[in-house]
Image (cartoon, helix red, strand yellow):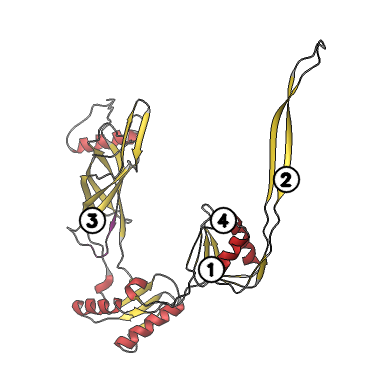
Amino acid sequence: MLWLGCCAISTPAHAERIKDLASIQGVRPNQLVGYGLVVGLDGTGDQTIQTPFTIQTLNNMLMQMGINVPPGTNMRLRNVAAVMVTASLPALAQPGQIVDVTVSSMGNARSLRGGTLLMTPLKGADGQVYGMAQGNLLVGGIGAAASGSKVQVNHLNAGRISGGATVERAVPVALGQGDTIRLELHTTDFSTTRRVVDAINERFGTGIAYALDARAIQVRTPQGSDERVAFIAEVESMNIRPAQMHAKVIVNSRTGSVVMNQSATVDACAIAHGNLSVVVSTEPVISQPGPFSGGRTVQAQRSTIEIKQESGMLTMVEGASLAEVVKALNAIGATPQDLLSILQAMKSAGALRAELEII
């Protein structure tokens, strides 16, 4: 059977809120990253001989605390691990706000379970520090090993600290400057953009919103901050019916899964698909000389080649809905890998009325 994810039943487009279709330019999260140390591990940290950067980081930290490690000291630590700390700074975050962080091992530590992250600066793309992270890790996995046997459940080299970072710097946002904002649709579509503009102008008056292109919409807002927030909240809560999306078929060549939207259709065409298989088998053959001949037994290889070709059954599909296409392809016994070839051939023949994307 084919593994298909699809929307086979054609249903009318339902109304969606503008806040689900678009975002306000500048009001978005920002990614933060930092490098730090996790301590307190139960002998499952980095093997410092193979990860010298862990020792270098530890020495730098101890030096800042007034502790000088003698040069050449062989520090065989197993309770420390070098990690990367990542976080997402929410839109309009203010200093003092707390955010969650993810801690991932970058050395050869076996587990971060039970570790504590030391104070780690979190930087943005501009190199500025926007947060500080520290706290005890929560690792969802668990494992044990003894005498060459090992049992592990889930992943042990990454953990999370809920509320583990404090925002130290706010990202400047131009939302309060000027008397306009810009709405940016998540998907480029001229029809949906037109509908959003018409809905806003019908609600607040002509000329309040106008489209810049198929994705961006300029909207005039009140001058006062309180009035502006109330206006934006009302705009985001408005419901519109987005335009029907382009017909599209997405095929995952690695897993064989196929996803089609309800706009995908097939024109009249005939499909015949057969499989050709070649089987080569080799078996040993013993050649034994006759009695008193003075010869010796020789082992040889004998190969047998068998070619099988399954006859392809011709199937007609026309003007088909998605359910009918799936039923027809199942009828000729097409496998997910066969479906890749069939869809490509249908697209080349002009019978598949959809954009074909292979990932």
Whether residue 94 is visible here, answered yes or no, is yes
Point 24% across, 65% down: residue: 92
**Mark 1 touches mark 3? (CB < 8 Å):** no
- Vertical placement of residue 357 versus 63, above or below: below
Q: How far apart are marks 2 and 1 (CA)?
A: 35 Å
Instruction: Give whichever of discs 1 and 3 has the lower sequence position.
Output: 3
Instruction: Give whichever of discs 3 and 2 has the lower sequence position.
Output: 3
State the mark number for residue 323: 1
Give the left or right position of residue 303, taking residue 24 as reference: right
Give the left or right position of residue 237, taking residue 255 as reference: left
Kind of residue at disc 2: Ile
**Mark 4 touches mark 3? (CB < 8 Å):** no
Task: Give residue 138's quadrant in the image.
Answer: top left
Location of residue 285 in the rendering, given as x and y in whole percent from the top left corner = 73, 26
Tag 1: Cα neighbours inside 10 Å, few (<14), some, or many (≥20)? few
- Mark 1 residue element: helix
**Mark 3 touches mark 2? (CB < 8 Å):** no
Magenta-tinted stretch: 86-93
Residue for badge 2? 307
Residue for badge 3? 99
Q: How far apart are marks 1 and 3 (CA)?
A: 46 Å
Location of residue 336 in the rendering, given as x and y in whole percent from the top left corner = 56, 56
- Vertical placement of residue 116 versus 13, above or below: above
Location of residue 325 in the rendering, given as x and y in whole percent from the top left corner = 57, 67
- Which residue is more in the foreground, 64 or 141? 141
Residue for badge 4? 336
Point 33% across, 31% down: residue: 145
> Is 230 inside the magenta-drawn segment?
no
- Which residue is more in the foreground, 9 or 64? 9
Location of residue 143 in the rendering, given as x and y in whole percent from the top left corner = 31, 36
- Vertical placement of residue 149 versus 312, above or below: above
Point 54% across, 58% down: residue: 2
